[in-house]
Image: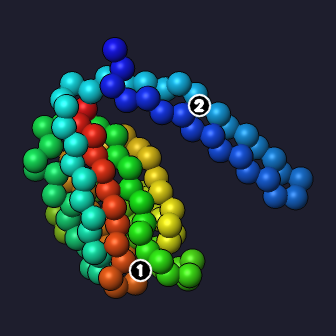
Amino acid sequence: MSDVNFSLNVQAAKGQFSQQFFVNGQTAVMNSAGMLAVTLNLGTSTQAITTASANALGYALARSLSTSTAQTATISFGRLSGTTLFEVVSLRPGEASWLRLAPGNYAAKAAVANSPLFIQILED
């Protein structure tokens, strides 16, 4: 039986360009029944995301909770190697991202200090 069910619907249109992408009824089985959820108040320096309490990293939902009206007030999220953040996701204020995490260390940083990021990780 599947433990996670999700669908994705992306529609883009600009001038002559038009694209639709649908993924419906996707499922995944979770071997662990855990979840890590945290809201970080990020600064402009790299901040590690502690996942030590999770048995195995699975799907993650990250959402910028920034209320800034500036499109440049982004939050970056990605893999952490030593002290280097390899940015994979860039969220503008209010945006969200859904992805499956590979094992490893993760971190985030903001372009503007005091930018909140909500991240929820379902164990795999």
Q: Residue furthest top?
A: 1
Q: In what quadrant of the picture does the N terminus appear? A: top left
Q: Position of residue 67 (x, y in %)?
A: 47, 77
What residue sits right under mark 1 in the picture? 111
Q: Position of residue 64 (x, y in %)?
A: 42, 66
Q: Nearer the viewer, mark 1 or mark 2?
A: 2
- Displayed quadrant of residue 27: top left
Task: Say if 27 sits above or below 37 in the image.
Answer: above
Q: Residues within 10 Å of mark 1 (few under 14, many from 20)?
A: some
Question: Secondary structure under badge 1?
Answer: loop
Nearest the viewer among 116 and 99 is 116
Horizontally, is 13 left or right of 71 in the view?
right
Q: Residue at x 24, y 59 (%)?
A: 38
Question: Secondary structure under badge 2?
Answer: strand
Nearest the viewer among 2 and 99 is 2
Q: Amino acid at mark 2?
A: Val
* N-term-proximal mark, 1 vs 2: 2
Horizontally, is 8 left or right of 58 in the view?
right
Q: Tell me how the rendering is colored.
A: rainbow
Q: Residues within 10 Å of mark 2 (few under 14, many from 20)?
A: few
Q: Amino acid at mark 1?
A: Ala
Could you tell me if residue 57 is visible in this image?
A: no
Task: Say if 20 sits above or below 45 in the image.
Answer: above
What residue sits right under mark 2 in the picture? 23
Q: Residue at x 36, y 77 (%)?
A: 115
Q: Position of residue 62 (x, y in %)?
A: 38, 56
